[in-house]
Amino acid sequence: MERLRLDPPALYLDAQGNVPQFESVRQARTELRVGGSAQAAADAGLYAEAVGGLVFGDSRDGQDPRHFLTHPTASGTHALTLGARLLAGMPPTRRVYLPTPSWSNHQRIFEEAGFEVGHYPYFDAHERQLDVDALVGFLCRLPDPAIIVLQASCHNPTGSDLSRDQWDVIADVIKALGHIPFIDMAYQGLGDTLQNDNYGVTAMADRGVFTLVAQSCSKIFQLSETRCGSLSAYCPSAAQAQPLARTMQSWTRMDAPPASLGVVARILSQPGLRKLWQDELNSMRDRVGQVRAALHKTLCRLSPAWDWSYLTHQRGFFSYDPALHPASGLAEAAALPDPRIVSASGRLGISLITERNLPQIAHAIAGASAP
Ligand SMILES: Cc1ncc(COP(=O)(O)O)c(C=O)c1O
């Protein structure tokens, strides 16, 4: 049986079952050692500009740059925490709504910031697909403007993403009803291209909707030990941006810059390194897609009566199948090479599956979901 070498919090294994390190990151680290710490300090501005470019894409083109703010954070989770703190200082919105399902730390982060946390419908577990009508209906029925946490590009634990058309509908509703979108985006480029994966952010900014974005570089640069991220805000007016910019500046004076800031700034600003990184990111995305296709094919052969199509419709590191709920005994079953491949809630860790452990995992899943 293959032993998974998984050092938390790394979540992606390559074809050999190892946690890979990007060559672009290695090269940038070497260059930084030569440049020294003065260079790293100068990189803070470069980082905010370059990461802001990833987050906002071409929605910044031709716009007043004062409307787009980006602040470096220690991680995507740290960005959520700072964003929650920022919103807590912007009364009167006291309620936050999270998708069902979401990540457990969302609830904790917003409760600690003093919000009442509710949940909106997102995934129809019976149909194994997104229920956008239920989502939109829910937003329309909210009695007051609220903060709506949305997840971009395969960030939802089900691996089910909103399409462009669905983002457009949601952005229209949010604008019409005065809700505040807070988009969590840790996997940009791992669902589709970098340019397509931030569509939700651009859909909001193009409509002039005040939007916060918690972004993470941890997965997309494979920075498992020295994570970094950013908190961005799109403000429809310079007047609204001013106090937020001041708050972000006060954080800069208080917090040490994230450890990998210089590495990411260098990669994004040097065309050769950026191209190398994009190729590495694309390969990671393609491999996850290949694993999905191979698992789908194997399961269709082992258990043809079952509908496995969700595996290829969902994207990214996670899939969700209610049949894999712990009641099935699968998570505890010795049949799995590693119990982390299926979480207690039935989430499947696609990015932990390799060519070698796939047959064993497929047999375990087919056995657990047999009618
Ligand atoms: C809810 C949520 N958002 C974002 C992230 C990604 O950010 P990071 O790994 O940089 O904290 C995580 C990671 O665990 C997360 O749980």
Image: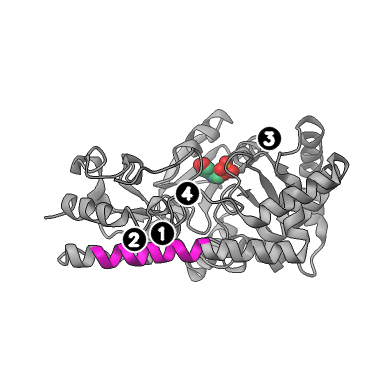
Residue 364, position as x, y percentages in the image:
21, 50
- Does any atom of ligand 1 lie closer than 8 Å to the CB of label 4? no
Q: Quadrant of residue 33?
A: top right
Q: Disc 1 versus disc 3: distance between alpha carbons?
A: 32 Å
Residue bearing mark 4: 18
Residue bearing mark 3: 89
- Does any atom of ligand 1 lie closer than 8 Å to the CB of label 1? no
Quadrant including the C terminus: bottom left
Marks 1 and 2 in Cβ contact (< 8 Å): yes
Q: What are the residue bounds of the magenta stretch?
A: 284-298
Q: Disc 2 versus disc 3: distance between alpha carbons?
A: 36 Å
Residue type indicated by callout 1: Ser
- On screen, residue 200 above or below 182: below
Residue bearing mark 1: 160
**Which circle marks residue 129 in the picture?**
2
**Which secondary structure lies at badge 4?**
loop
Residue 232, position as x, y percentages in the image:
69, 50
Residue type indicated by callout 3: Gly
> Which of the marked residues, 4 or 2, is nearer the chain's N terminus?
4
